[in-house]
Image (cartoon, helix red, strand yellow):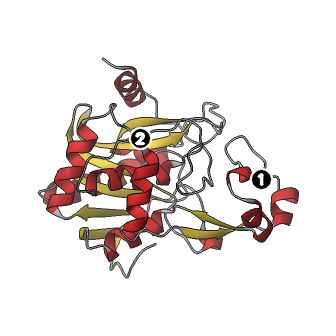
Amino acid sequence: MSHLWMRFAWLLCLPLAAHAGNDCREQPLPPAKVAAAAETALRAAAALDQMDASVALIARVGTDLSRQGLVYSHAGFVLRDHPQGRWTVVHLLNECGSDRSGLYAQGLVNFFSDDLINQDLRIVWFKPDVAQRLTARLQQMPRHGLHHPHYNLIARPGSRDYQNSTAWLIEIMASAIADRPIYDRVTAYAFARGDGFAPDTIHVPYTKRVLGGLFTANVDFTDHPVATRLSGDYPVVTVRSIFRYLDSAGYTERVLEWRNGRPMTVPGPA
């Protein structure tokens, strides 16, 4: 078994505690949060079972991004009949608030147990041909995983030196959608841009950077050019920008969303 798949198997054995993106202190979740995560996982699994699809994109709310006009902060690919379980989320996670990341496979309960802001979720199903290509690509992992372990929360889209969870998603999708095999990150992102993908712009004022204590191990502003840092307008791959790309390029088959446990009409990217 490869190192990555051993990591996948190990993660599935973790207790229900918050780990991704924090300092990795053991923080067992209260029973109410565990129950809420289980309820969301069952809701997601039921919806996934109703669709004849081998893969979908699933999003959660781990951080409050409402000031940036965003809802969903993180997403992953949820695979049917993965070696680790029928519905398993494959995604990139920041490791303990450090400048490193890893690719992980989680069951749905664990995916929604990471001390989230709430239990809202969105599932996006791909057109059948896109789903088929994406499934084949994900089944190759850990080979051709397009993973760069140097993590930056605000990684510049297309950066050679850094990557975050959303950048990894768009690069993997582009590598699968392209009409020829793509096995490097720069080419994958270039294809996505040529195919209509556009990142969002996140405004972080210079004063907030300096006075707001934003200099942490998993945030590196120097990945962006000086002009961007002076303006405070940072291009970043967000979950919303991925939704927007899939919709505008015609790769979306169906979308379902739940807010506060209730199904919602999906007006557009969030």
Please tell me in which quadrant of the rendered image residue 69 appears: bottom right
* Horizontal and vertical percent position of residue 181: 27, 46
Nearest the camera: 252 or 225?
Answer: 225
Nearest the camera: 65 or 259?
Answer: 65
- Residue situated furthest top in the rendering: 1
Name the image quarter holding the N terminus.
Answer: top left
Q: Circle 1 sits in a helix, a strand or a loop, which is it?
A: loop
Q: Rate crowding at label 1 as few (under 14), some (14 to 19) or many (20 or more) other CA atoms within 10 Å.
A: some
The amino acid marked with disc number 1 is Leu
Please tell me in which quadrant of the rendered image residue 124 appears: bottom left
* Horizontal and vertical percent position of residue 151: 59, 42
Q: CA distance from mark 1 to mark 2?
A: 28 Å
* Horizontal and vertical percent position of residue 84: 27, 31
Image point 71% across, 48% down: which residue?
Answer: 220
Relative height, residue 23 to residue 220 (above, below): above
Relative height, residue 114 to residue 206 (above, below): above
Relative height, residue 15 to residue 135 (above, below): above
Q: What residue sits right under mark 2 in the picture? A: 146
Image point 30% across, 73% down: which residue?
Answer: 249
Q: Is residue 248 left or right of residue 66?
A: left
* Horizontal and vertical percent position of residue 227: 75, 66
Nearest the camera: 239 or 41?
Answer: 239
Please tell me in which quadrant of the rendered image residue 141 appears: top left
Residue 214: give its label. Answer: 1
Residue 36 visible (yes or no): no
Q: Circle 2 sits in a helix, a strand or a loop, which is it?
A: loop
The amino acid marked with disc number 2 is Leu
Image point 21% across, 59% down: which residue?
Answer: 130
